[in-house]
Image: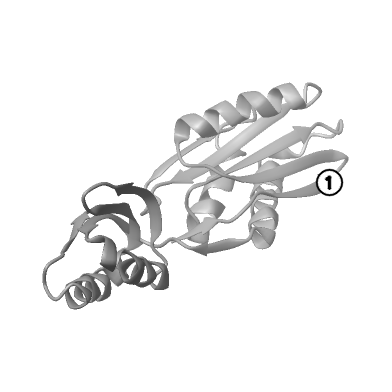
Amino acid sequence: MRIPLESAQTELEVRKSKFFTFAIPCTSLTEAKHMVSTLKQEHPGANHVVHAAVIGERGDEFSYSDDREPKNTAGRPALEVLKGSGITNVAIFIVRYFGGTLLGTGGLVKAYGDSAKNVLEILKTEELIETCSFSITTAYNLYEPIKKLLTDSKAAIEDEQFATDVSIKGTLATTEKEYVAHGVIELSNGRDHIVFID
């Protein structure tokens, strides 16, 4: 699975109807639905604000809405394109301004499907990396070498406490667990251990 790095926007015109499409990073279905309300406020003249969202590490949570377009002609085609893209934690919003010509169900399915395809083609993404949380408690003299080991492993440090010993908490790619655990044992001559919380 891949996740978006930033938002993207495209525009499509079909028989004078305008389709403004936004792909926005999103981590919950509630957040996606809230964004629909925001876009409706930003586009008061729009006839429809359709959405499709795929959330979760395995992309197994999703929602969509046709927003008063005929059933399964708007949100559903956009969702199918999104599910086929392998991108998760993203919501697509398609704001339609009606151009006066009815597109028919086939025309709507194509317009909304193409809108989703177009925005996903330009959306910058990266591989979703599985991470785990960790904590280490170590002596002051080992703080710098252990911090370097964590930095080299691209760990994200979330908290450091300096008391009798130094406690470090953060997250790390699960692929780096073994390397870091071995490094901590080696640097401390077996005295310190890293604790992982999946």
* Residue at the far left in the pictured view: 190
Instruction: Work out whether residue 166 or residue 117 is closer to the camera in this orientation and state it.
Output: 166
Instruction: Work out whether residue 34 or residue 171 is closer to the camera in this orientation and state it.
Output: 171
Using residue 27 as the reference point, say whether residue 74 is left or right of it.
Answer: right
Where in the figure is residue 114, as x and y percent of width and height?
Answer: 69, 53
92 above or below 156? above
Where, quadrant-wise, is the N terminus in this rendering?
bottom left
Residue at x 27%, y 67% (from the top left corner):
142
Using residue 97 as the reference point, say whether residue 73 is left or right of it.
Answer: left
Where in the figure is residue 195, as x and y percent of width and height?
Answer: 18, 57
Using residue 161 as the reference point, say whether residue 31 is left or right of it.
Answer: right
Pointer 1 residue:
13
Where in the figure is residue 191, as x and y percent of width and height?
Answer: 11, 68
172 above or below 29? below
Q: Is residue 128 visible?
A: yes
Q: Residues within 10 Å of mark 1 (few under 14, many from 20)?
A: some
Residue at x 83%, y 46% (from the top left corner):
13
Badge 1 element? strand
Residue at x 70%, y 24% (from the top left corner):
40
Q: Amino acid at mark 1?
A: Glu
Q: How is the image coloured?
A: one colour
Query: How many numbered marks does the figure carry?
Result: 1
Instruction: Work out whether residue 135 or residue 33 is closer to the camera in this orientation and state it.
Output: 135
Using residue 28 as the reference point, say whether residue 143 is left or right of it.
Answer: left
Instruction: Work out whether residue 164 or residue 3 is closer to the camera in this orientation and state it.
Output: 164
